[in-house]
Amino acid sequence: MNHSTVRRQAPTDRREGRLGVSHAAGLVLGMLIIRGLQAVFRTEVHGAEHLRHAPGALVLSNHRRDSDGPLLGGVLMHPEGLRFKGVEPFFIAREDLFRPGFLGQYLQDYPRPLRLLRHLPLAGALSAIQLRPLRRIPEYSLGEVLTDVLEQLGDRPLAQTLRPAWVQRVAHALGRDAAVLRVSDALRAPRALRYQTHAFRRLTRATFRALLPYQRSVIAGQLQAFAHLVEDGATILLEPEGRISPDGRFHRPRQALHYLLNASTRTPHILPVAISYDFMRPGRTRVLVRFGPPLHGLSGQSRRATDTTVARAVLGLWTVCASQLTGYYLLHHDAPTTRDALSAALAHWFTEIAQRCARLGVPLDPLLADPKGRQRRARECAAWSLRARPDRTRLEYLDRELNAIASAHPGLLDGDTAQ
């Protein structure tokens, strides 16, 4: 594939005939992000032949970590040296990333050196690397929703705006009488309170109903902007679940996917991709990225039919890796407690699943398809497990990942003694 032929035309400064400053800054920032991720993750791409469909496509992926989007963006952009040889996508991103102070809140539990980044303004940088915001109601903060109330409905008494328990919380934080507080007063509450999410649940029913038309109009405008990108033939990277999976499953796509497929007169390619993280190993975490053939005929279908087709396509591409198998094994089996015994048990388990994957056509990590690779990964996973002692919550997440894959490939886990 000649990547240079699929690269999106960059915006230019007409007066000087050169790359626009914001685009050039985005390229530099994008390169720094991708190279930084390459120091942490080792990305392996399968199904790369399908990337010829990437220009002008809706690229749809499952969502496992915050790193998913930048990693997939790096695959699509295909950096060589100091240049990108592939297609430069637009990213549909959660709107709260653009919120002032988001980075400070996000990094508050990180090591102190990283927390020094909390004062960096994100909005301009994100726009430069072609992230575009989409409002997600669950992440909308109390401060943001109160700002909307102030602008759309006026400086109402807080008791008419928030539920009683939240009026009291604001009053306590400000050290004032709840009866005299107004919306503008609540906007001076401590940041920890203003950054509380699921803010629409804090509103009175009357206020929520009064504000709902405005919220719908904002989301409609954002979706229309993405529809214009589709019309223009841009490549758009979308994680249709709308958030990182909280439990390891693949969740129903949100409304944006169905809207974009039907709001444009141009029918884009739908390019499915699945991403798996194989982290139980020394060194960098392996990231297994698998592209599938484009999906056709989704425009004009019902949302339920669209969601079902996309979910099946993504689940069908999800690669079985050693970390998932180890998590499942430790959760469901009486695992040995010595390294050699656990390594032998895992090697046997990997072999059993590798045979089932070959029989059922399930995507399998190439290392597990090779006997020597299975032995090596069994030793590495055994050593990692005994050293890290993963808690039950982490094992259950991996278990649900493997069961999500099995839902697209009946028989993958049949016959296991734990079933």
Image (cartoon, rainbow, N blue to C red):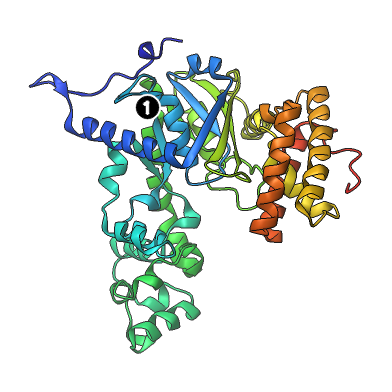
- Taking 386 as reference, is 8 above or below it? above
Q: Residue at x 48, y 14 (%)?
A: 52
For disc 1, the marked residue is 229
Looking at the image, can residue 386 be seen?
A: yes
Q: Is residue 212 left or right of residue 361?
A: left
- Farthest residue to the left: give it: 15
Q: Is residue 405 left or right of residue 85?
A: right
- Farthest residue to the front: give it: 340
Percent coordinates x, y for residue 390 in the rendering: 67, 58
Looking at the image, can residue 223 be seen?
A: no
Q: Depth check: 194 or 352 in front?
A: 352
Q: Residue at x 29, y 71 (%)?
A: 155
Q: Depth check: 217 or 68 in front?
A: 68
- Disc 1, SS: helix
Q: Is residue 398 left or right of residue 267?
A: right
Q: Depth check: 14 or 4 in front?
A: 4
Going by the numbered disc 1, the residue's amino acid type is Leu
Percent coordinates x, y for residue 67 in the rendering: 47, 43
Percent coordinates x, y for residue 278 in the rendering: 62, 40
Q: Depth check: 223 or 119 in front?
A: 119
Count of all numbered marks drawn on residues in the image:
1
Task: Determine the image quadrant of residue 102.
Answer: bottom left
Percent coordinates x, y for residue 400 in the rendering: 72, 47
- Taking 12 as reference, is 288 above or below it? below
Q: How crowded is mark 1: few (under 14 residues within 10 Å), some or many (20 or more)?
A: some
Q: Which residue is drawn at 43% across and 20% down?
A: 56
Task: Determine the image quadrant of residue 17.
Answer: top left
- Taking 115 as reference, is 190 above or below it? below
